[in-house]
Amino acid sequence: MLTRAQGARALVLRAIPYGESDVVVHLLVEGRGRLAAFARGARNSARRFRGALQPFNLIEAMLAERRGADLSSLHEASILEGWPPLRDDLSRLAHAGYAAELVHDLTLEGVAADALFELLCSFFARLCAAAPTSSRLRALELLALEAAGLSPELSCCARCGAELAPGQAAFDPAAGGLACPRCVSPGALPLTHGARLLMQQLQRGGLEAADAPLSADGSGRPADARGFEEAARQAAPALTAFLGHHLGRRLRSAGFIVDVSAPR
């Protein structure tokens, strides 16, 4: 038995064909969190779905719960924002796919995640407006981890709280972030001073800081864009390991970023 369908804004994270004409859609629904929905006849119905079920679309979805079933029922959907440039080149497509998978895996089914909903909308909009960058990807990872309650410790030793001297530091995923020489474990990764400062700036300033970074000298001047991007690439292994530690696996879409030579 179905409950009455209600409208809600939702982001399409993935869409999986089922049978000859149906689709199982994974959505991040505003106010409700992640859920999977069954769209009966979606591939044959231009009137009810109008191309809305492509990944990355922001849609108005008419959803009803299916009592006793794992899937909700998606009766119809219309596009509110499609962000067409995300599909126009492989680098944007790769970053959008990574963002969608990251948010999917950091959310729990049926648990509201509106901070991640807004983050994904903002990331898609910025990705449409400017070329993909490593620094924006690092900001996305740090903001998504913060929204999920998993933010890494970057200001002191994550184990004992000791201050860390400037220079190369150890990033220990098992410890929860940076680790001092006394607390570091064998699985820690080296983190350059530049990467550490970049991560701290992005953790504070988010996507805005990624697109308009400031110099690390405290002068308020714009940072050197090339040097900032290099620091973002240096930070990638640490955050990849940190995500893998919490998710239990490497995100599949990370391989596609490498395959199409998009900024990583």
Image (cartoon, grey):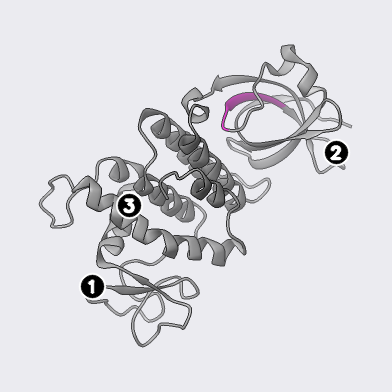
Residue at the far left: name it: 219
Q: For mark 1, give the secondary structure.
A: loop
Tell me: residue 177, above or below residue 76: below
Separation of marks 2 and 1 at Cα, in angstroms: 57 Å
Instruction: From the top left corner, tell me how far across and down residue 71 is, in percent.
Output: 79, 39
Residue under numbered circle 2: 67
Q: Nearer the viewer, residue 136 or 29?
A: 136
Q: Is residue 119 magenta?
A: no
Within-10-Å neighbours for mark 1: few <14, some 14–19, many 20+: few
Q: Nearer the viewer, mark 3 or mark 2?
A: 3
Identify the residue position indicated by label 1 in the image.
Answer: 167
Q: Residues within 10 Å of mark 2 (few under 14, many from 20)?
A: few
Instruction: Specify the quadrant that holds the N terminus.
Output: top right
Viewer-nearest of labels 2 and 1?
Answer: 1
* Image spot of residue 16 (x, y percent): 74, 36
Residue at the (41%, 79%) spot, across then down: 159
The quadrant where residue 151 appears: bottom left
- Report the Cα–Cα distance between label 3 and label 2: 43 Å
In the picture, measured across the screen, residue 191 lies left or right of residue 256, that is: left
Examine the rendering and report whether any part of residue 27 can be seen. Answer: yes
User: Magenta stretch?
Assistant: 56-62
Taking the spot 30% from the left edge, 61% from the top edge, the residue there is 195
Tags 3 and 2 in contact by the CB under 8 Å rule? no
Q: Amino acid at mark 3?
A: Leu
Please tell me which of labels 1 and 3 falls first in the chain. 1
| Circles 1 and 3 in contact, beta carbons < 8 Å | no
Dot placed on the residue nearer the N-terminal end, 3 or 2: 2
In x, y percent, where is residue 132?
A: 39, 39
| Mark drawn on residue 202 | 3
Residue 60 on the magenta span: yes
Residue 151 in view, yes or no? no
For this orientation, the residue located farthest to the top is: 47
